[in-house]
């Protein structure tokens, strides 16, 4: 989600890469679950997040809409996000104060309290200095914090997906017809979230093939 705030306001002013150390260590959260509650619409999911969640729950995308996820318009495009429950405002995956899908938690959850900022065809990480409830955090290498087995492929996917959404948003911004805008937005959902991925094949390659073949960008 694009945010209209200055880096000076929210970060320590440094630009980090996956090789850098940052003050992230929060003693395994130690009973805190603050960033899994009342986060509103901020935890937007990408196709990898949804693929992992549906595989883990052995279900399809549609069956978790309204329970674990909901749909929202993010910068003009309809995308899934983590649903905060009506009763407590907590993520539905938060069980007994812990994330019940920790091993496959979404990318935004892996990052927190890091953020990503995109510039010059790439991105860097920044530390959201006031977001985590723990104040005296220890230094942790960012690649370790994110915890992806293949961080190079993961970062390539993150950037490719971001660039794809930028192109879709630019295309939608030029449309006048409401129905055309809705159809374009729904196509993203249908092509990248609803249509299942073959678990026997490389996930990233499947996404890249879908982006390459995306009819509206031809
Ligand atoms: S706010 Fe910090 S300590 Fe609390 S759950 Fe989130 S990452 Fe863990
Ligand atoms: S998926 Fe896990 S880490 Fe992310 S908000 Fe929900 S409980 Fe927290």
Image (tube, rainbow, N blue to C red):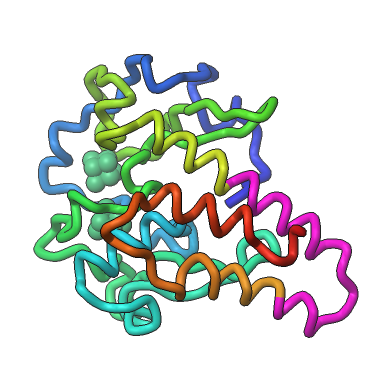
Task: Please indicate whether residue 215 sits to the left or right of residue 37 in the image.
Answer: right
User: Where does the C terminus fall, quadrant-wise?
Assistant: bottom right
- Seen in the picture, residue 133 relative to 43 is either above or below; the reply is above
Does the magenta stretch mainly form a helix, a strand or a loop? helix
Number of numbered tags placed on the structure image: 0
Give percent across and percent down for residue 177.
87, 80
Residue 134 position by quadrant: top left
Task: Please indicate whether residue 160 sits to the left or right of residue 200 in the image.
Answer: right
- Seen in the picture, residue 192 relative to 17 is either above or below; the reply is below
Q: Residue at x 28, y 64 (%)?
A: 53
Where are the magenta residues, as a range? 162-183
Residue 188 position by quadrant: bottom right
**Membership of 167 in magenta stretch:** yes
The answer to whether residue 36 shows anywhere in this view is no
Q: Residue at x 39, y 22 (%)?
A: 18
User: Ligand 1 quadrant?
Assistant: top left
Q: Nearer the viewer, residue 161 or 109?
A: 161
Give percent across and percent down for residue 23.
31, 21
Task: Please indicate whether residue 119 sits to the left or right of residue 202 in the image.
Answer: right
């Amino acid at each position: 989600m694009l945010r209209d705030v200055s880096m000076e306001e929210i970060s320590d002013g440094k630009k980090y890469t996956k090789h850098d150390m940052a003050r992230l260590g929060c003693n395994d959260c130690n009973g805190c679950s603050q960033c899994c509650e009342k986060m509103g619409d901020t935890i937007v999911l990408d196709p990898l997040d949804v693929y992992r969640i549906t595989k883990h729950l052995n279900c399809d995308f549609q069956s978790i809409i309204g329970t674990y996820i909901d749909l929202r318009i993010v910068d003009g495009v309809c995308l899934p996000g983590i649903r905060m429950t009506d009763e407590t405002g907590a993520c539905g995956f938060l069980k007994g104060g812990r994330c019940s899908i920790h091993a496959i938690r979404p990318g935004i959850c892996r990052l927190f309290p890091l953020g990503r900022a995109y510039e010059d065809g790439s991105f860097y990480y920044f530390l959201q200095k006031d977001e985590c409830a723990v104040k005296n955090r220890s230094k942790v290498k960012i690649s370790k914090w994110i915890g992806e087995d293949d961080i190079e492929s993961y970062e390539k996917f993150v950037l490719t997906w971001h660039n794809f959404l930028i192109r879709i948003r630019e295309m939608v911004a030029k449309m006048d017809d409401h129905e055309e805008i809705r159809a374009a937005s729904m196509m993203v959902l249908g092509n990248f979230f609803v249509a299942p991925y073959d678990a026997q094949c490389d996930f990233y390659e499947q996404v890249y093939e879908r982006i390459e073949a995306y009819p509206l960008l031809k």
